[in-house]
Image (cartoon, helix red, strand yellow):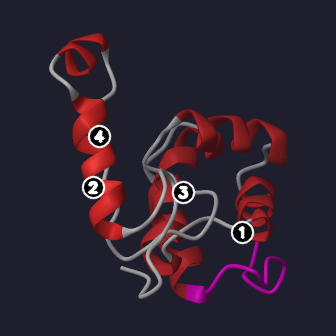
Amino acid sequence: MTSEIIPVLSETEFDQINEEIAHAPYRSAVAIDALKIVQSHRGWVSDQSLQAIAKHLDMSAEELDGIATFYNLIFRRPVGDKVIMLCNSVTCWIKGYKQLQNEICEQLNIGVGETTADNQ
């Protein structure tokens, strides 16, 4: 498969994904790596990019999206340059993560999942 077949992916992304494929027992085994490669170049994984990756890995877009949405470090929409992640487990809830979350949102003047106006 050549990059002309998948014009959504850059030549660099395509080459890096192919490097991962070369070390894998089957194409879909590099799904997470491929998503991370595209995200490292673009900051997130668009629907178009996801479909191109899925096609290249011989997977359905739905199957790959299921993988992408399972991992909280794969962003399926644009995010700011810095992403703040807070633990919301039972232990963190007991220790008061909600207060910390509220203070961060208040200081940055954003809600949970939002990005500041300066895209930081």
In this picture, is 44 found above or below 11?
A: above
Look at discs 4 and 3 and give the one toward the viewer.
Answer: 4
Image coordinates for residue 44, horizontal then vertical, percent = 55, 67
Identify which residue is drawn at 27% across, 65% down: 107
Looking at the image, the residue that sits furthest to the left is: 95
**Earlier sequence position, callout 4 versus callout 2:** 4
Residue 29, percent from left and from top: 56, 38
CA gap between label 4 and label 2 equals 10 Å
Whether 6 is among the magenta residues is yes
Q: Dots 4 and 2: beta carbons under 8 Å? A: yes
Q: State if disc 4 and disc 1 touch (CB < 8 Å).
A: no
**Which residue is denoted by mark 2 in the rendering?**
104
Residue that numbered label 4 is attached to: 86
Which residue shows up at 60% across the image and 44% down it?
68
Cα distance in 3D space between marks 2 and 3: 20 Å
Amino acid bearing label 4: Leu
* Marking on residue 75: 3
Question: Label 3 sits on what residue type?
Answer: Phe
For label 1, the residue is 49
Q: CA distance from mark 4 to mark 3?
A: 16 Å
* Classed neighbour count for the residue bearing mark 1: other residues with Cα under 10 Å, few (<14), some (14–19), many (≥20): many
